[in-house]
Image (cartoon, helix red, strand yellow):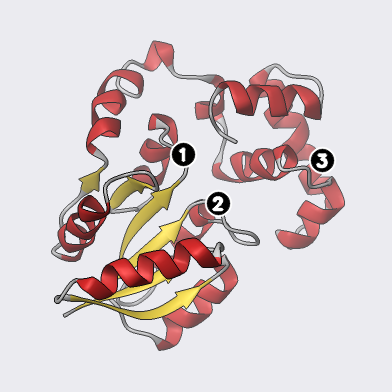
Amino acid sequence: MIRVLVAEDHTIVREGIKQLIGLAKDLTVVGEACNGEQLLETLRNTPCEVVLLDISMPGVNGLEAIPRIRALDEPPAVLVLSMHDEAQMAARALKIGAAGYATKDSDPALLLTAIRKVAAGGRYIDPELADRMVFEVGLTDSRPPHALLSEREFSVFERLVRGEGVNEIALQLSVSSKTISTHKARLMQKLNLHSVADLVKYAVEHKLL
């Protein structure tokens, strides 16, 4: 039996995933989490083979959680489930240790296949996304500016775009406001943008929102 832990902050989506997994005879949901901190806490006491991880959760987000999950003594495989069908995002998640990347609008049967595949030590990438990754991520010249952001800068970028202020982000990430301001200045520079409104526009244009 493949044990799955579902980390997703939207209750409806989480319940839907649990029902779907419940239909499969060889899979079982052993735990759930609605944010990154809760996920890391649950993992300490709940052995599982696969973590189904939503990439944009509040608090410690999915991208930040991946290295922490991989650092556990017996790390489960991480299958990212994302609203972003973005090649850069998938490449980033896989690079830092995810075993697979599925999108929320993919066929439910494919999600079950993906869980089985990563549980067996394999890799899985949403088929439509795989094609795009070869072209978009493979051709370094055409990489968008946000591909140059560090994990932390990208995390700050995501939060600014969602309307969170510097102090709020500092509190969530347990660092000083000054540190967040530095990250903000750096990411603005790398993206060649000058205001939060520009960031939001950029996020919309690159389907990051």
Residue beneath label 2, please?
A: 56
Q: Quadrant of residue 142?
A: top left
Q: Is residue 63 left or right of residue 119?
A: right
- The relative height of residue 184 versus residue 179 in the rendered view (above or below) is above
Residue beneath label 1, please?
A: 84
Q: Does label 1 or label 3 sit earlier along the sequence?
A: 1
Q: Quadrant of residue 163?
A: top right
Secondary-structure class at tag 3: helix
What residue lies at 73% left-to-right and 19% top-to-bottom? 193
What residue lies at 77% left-to-right and 52% top-to-bottom? 169
Give the percent coordinates (x, y) of residue 200. 71, 29
Q: Amino acid at mark 3?
A: Ser
Front one among 188 and 136: 136
Q: Does label 1 or label 2 sit earlier along the sequence?
A: 2
Q: Does label 2 or label 3 sit earlier along the sequence?
A: 2
What residue lies at 60% left-to-right and 61% top-to-bottom? 60
Which mark is on residue 181?
A: 3
Secondary-structure class at tag 2: loop
Nearer to us of marks 2 and 3 is 2
